[in-house]
Amino acid sequence: MKPCQALLLCCTFLLLTLTSAPARSEQMSPKLNHKPLASEENRFSRMADNFFIIYDPSTTMNVPYKLTGMTRIEAEKKILRESNASLPQLNWQAGLYPHWKGELWLPASPFAFKPYYRLQIYKKADYGAAIEQLPITPQSPPMLQTGLMKLDHLLGLPGRTEVFMFSDGKHSTFQELESPPLTLAKQLAAKYDVCFNIVSSATDAKDRKLLDDIAAVNSCSQVIDFDTAYDHPEHLLGKLYMDTRDNGFNNILFDFDKVNIKPEAAAQLDRLGQMLVANPHLSVVLSGFTDSIGSEAYNKRLSQRRAESVRNYLHAKFKIKPNTTLMYWYGYANPVAPNDTEDGRRQNRRVTIVIRGQ
């Protein structure tokens, strides 16, 4: 790199840090192990404090999407439009950014991460207007590396932050930035209370593995298939909240540190499976939880395995398709009973069932 280029790169990094970073708390963000904020109607509970959507308008996404008559970029925008329409108003802090916006020779420029919705309180109408401004023509080569790098200037907010990032697993690596995408994701997960939700359109094994590896950097991240997000856009942001309405299905309870379906739960799951078979337009959200015994990371994985256990039961017995069931897992968050009694802990070891599409 020429000396003048190095000086320009350092200056733009400094400018980005001074102008783009939100206010941060001095202490580590508290873990979400309390009762989440509920809406005035007591129908929804907020399961995260902040969220960002990272949009991918790259050249590799500019390909036909199935037989929809749209490119994958256009389908991506449609998913976001419909996802936003389904989201309740629960006072998150939110932002909307592309992977990239700017000159290719200035990877560190603050203009390369233009906010379409600058970090602020979420307002459905304003966020929807920002989505309509997203480009549907390709803006650059795939820039997953820079998208992750620039998140470092947005994270550090109080509470948990969910990042929803579209990607096909491809990326253009700038040697000046050194760290590859997986290393950057690991650094962010170690530094912040953040979960990565990657909407994957990867088509080859190498790209899928990269996105799977990024989702494995901590216990709350996951990969969501692009087709599932397109077929059920209401699922995409569903991890941000819980619908607490009584829909006729009780929680599926588990023994301590176990994930197997108990015999007394079979009748209810059979009724759920029969409903999904008879009504293919319906979908189900399975949310896993634990009691408070053990570490947060262990309980996150345990709650994930419990949700998987219910999904696997429905698939094995009723052939329910994977894109009809979406899983979330929260560990020991959102207890429904005190964890200082055995009966309370028993009630908290659960998978909740929410029907969507009714």
Image: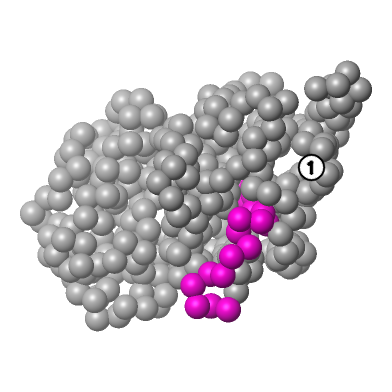
Q: Is residue 301 left or right of residue 37?
A: left
Residue at x 20% of width, y 42% of height: 259
In the displayed structure, 25 sits above or below 117; it is: above
Occupied quadrant, residue 80: bottom right
In reply to whether residue 131 is colored magenta, the answer given is no
Residue at x 36% of width, y 36% of height: 300
Magenta stretch: give its range.
Answer: 50-69
Q: Is residue 317 left or right of residue 56?
A: left
Which color mode does the image show?
one colour
In the displayed structure, 125 sits above or below 357; it is: above
- At mark 1, the secondary structure is loop
Residue sitting at the far right:
4
Q: Is residue 215 visible?
A: no
Q: Is residue 346 visible?
A: yes
Q: State the residue position of label 1.
A: 104
Nearest to the observer: residue 168 or residue 264? 168
Residue sitting at the far bottom:
278
Nearest to the observer: residue 12 or residue 158? 12
Residue at x 73% of width, y 68% of height: 132
Question: Amino acid type of disc 1?
Answer: Leu
